[in-house]
Image (cartoon, helix red, strand yellow):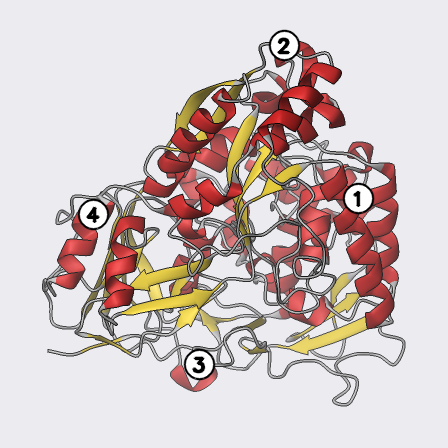
Amino acid sequence: MKKSRALGAGVLVAVLAIAPTACSSGSSSDSNTLNMLGVGDVDYMDPNISYYTAGYEALRLWSRQLLTYPAIKGKTTTDVPDLATQVPTTANGGISADGLTYKLTIRKGAKWDTSPARQVTAADVVRGVKRTCNPAQPFGGMPDFQTLIVGMSSYCTGFAKVNAKSASAIAAYQNKTALPGVSVDPSNPLTVVFKLTQPAAYFTAMLALPAFSPSPVEYDKYIPASAQLAQHTISDGPYKITKYVPTKEIDFSRNSAWDKSTDKVRGAYVDKVVINETGEQGSIQQQLQANTSSADMEWDTFPPVTAVPGLIAKKDPNLDIGATFSSNPYIVFNTVSPNNAKALAKVAVRKAVSEAFNRAHMTQDLGGAVIAPPLTHILPKGISGTQSNTSPDPYPYDLTKAKADLAAAGVKNLKLKLLYRTASSASKSLFVTIQQDLKSAGITVTGVGASNADFYTKYLQVPSAAKRGTWDLAIAGWGPDWYGDAAASFFQPLFYGNNGGDGSAFPPNGSDFGFYNSAKVNQLIVAAAKEQDPTKSAALWAQADATVTNDAAIFPITTGNQPVYHASHLKNAIFIPAFQQYDPANVKLSS
């Protein structure tokens, strides 16, 4: 998930990011060290590029955004100022009367961990936004704003032609090429100005995305999202990274350049944070329940599905079940797969396969109706334009119909490769269930296992993997990039095919992993994004939902609620939907 995607953005890992762990190598028993035990890594150690929930959770500790979400129960999806002095509105002058210009001023005293410490400026924000569509590894949510910010599409088109293997070439283009829609206010070097191509009521909420984070000039030395940059991070948050061994360990210590008076969001109560990424899901759960001194909270993992019913039954006070507002997991159809004579390019075939999926079996794998309430359409409850509570299931489980429809489509002996995460107990269970259920429809399913770290970065985000037929189906997940009026953060990154043109969601610029493309849906997305009347825009998003669902671009499974667990000595544990986890920057430890 994005965080983003998914989550989204999008982030995007939620219940499926679970996996095995045998911990201890990176743990600490220091009295004020937060020990997080997990099974996977961040996607990228780069604020402007990271797009998944584990990445966002780590960024909370060392990278600040213009706006963000507070660790306050009941307000965890409400934007508050972070680096910015205030949330922009028309009333306070942050948004122009025509809705096309936004101004945000950075707090004085917010500094980079450089030597000497240096004020974060509006120029750093401009640099950060420019980096998002770099040719080496663009931000996965580019469709959210590529056509919304003035000049961004043409800027990104030119950027794509730059040598992706040259840090100097990337920096030269970035520094010499203007981006008209993002600039420094001539009257104040701490004020950044955004200009939009059209009014967008949700742009304020979008500014909480890490993609809009400032970037220090030192990052020009490195290719964005590279392993080299990951070893030379510069912090403007309460902690700095002191050790990073990919897929193994991340250590944080206090950042002396951070001034608490400039940060109203992060309490930063612990002195150090140690993240062990080498664990096993069941072992982590046992250590947390046993209140082991070197086990405080989870990282990129969650309670095993089989453990959750018992925890709920005994009302374990250390268990929380958080709303995610997500479609997680869902099944992606690879419409460009050459396998089976390109059968999945046909809507009729995708519909027939959808009729062979047994959603009830899948939701049982994910913990049952409390944890995994079924989702039959694209948008989950709580997102504008949702159809999940008003429309019937378009693909109820029906083996007889599935077989008949496959035959009518001229398909025999369909053989599908399913991409799933080997470190996730839920993902593995879903693979087995899908394999068994589809076998009853005469469809053979084989597994393509991937680690959490590789699932997106080496498979779904790599266009050639889809086009080679490395996978036909994939178990992915998606959450909104913001909340409420957030339908755009589902449709623009996931379904805006646009023939691969400006703002296209095809990987690696977006998250349309199956390369779905519909002229009708593209038109509806554009119209809904422009519409300023909330009722009318919701109706347009509902039409887009119905069309994508009818085309069987994906098979939704659940709008899952996320179980999370912590040790008894962890206090002030607040679940943040954007992280799919407790906020590590605000927890406290008791003896």
Q: Along the polypeptide, which appears first: circle 1 or circle 4?
A: 4
Is 2 situated left or right of 363 in this image?
right
Residue sitting at the far front: 400
Judge from the rendering whether residue 463 lies leftward or rightward of residue 562; answer left or right.
right
- Mark 4 / mark 2, whichever is N-terminal: 4
Disc 2, SS: loop
Residue pointed to by mark 3? 73
Find residue 537 and report its horizontal and vertical position in percent. 83, 64
Does residue 175 appear in the picture of this structure?
Answer: no
Give the labeled residue for mark 4: 282
Question: Which residue is disc 1 drawn over?
Answer: 547
Q: Amino acid at mark 1?
A: Thr
**Residue 235 at what x, y percent from top left?**
42, 63
| For marks 2 and 3 on the same chain, the one whose residue lies earlier in the sequence | 3
Is residue 209 visible in the rendered image? The answer is yes
Q: Find disc 2 in the rendering and name its residue.
A: 412
Q: Is residue 486 above or below residue 359?
A: below
Q: Mark 4–mark 3 contact, CB under 8 Å?
A: no
Residue appearing at x 58%, y 17% in the figure? 469
Q: Which of the image's four quarters has the C terminus?
A: bottom left
User: In the image, what residue type sits under mark 4?
Assistant: Gly
Asked whether the beta carbons under mark 3 and mark 1 sit within 8 Å of each other, the answer is no
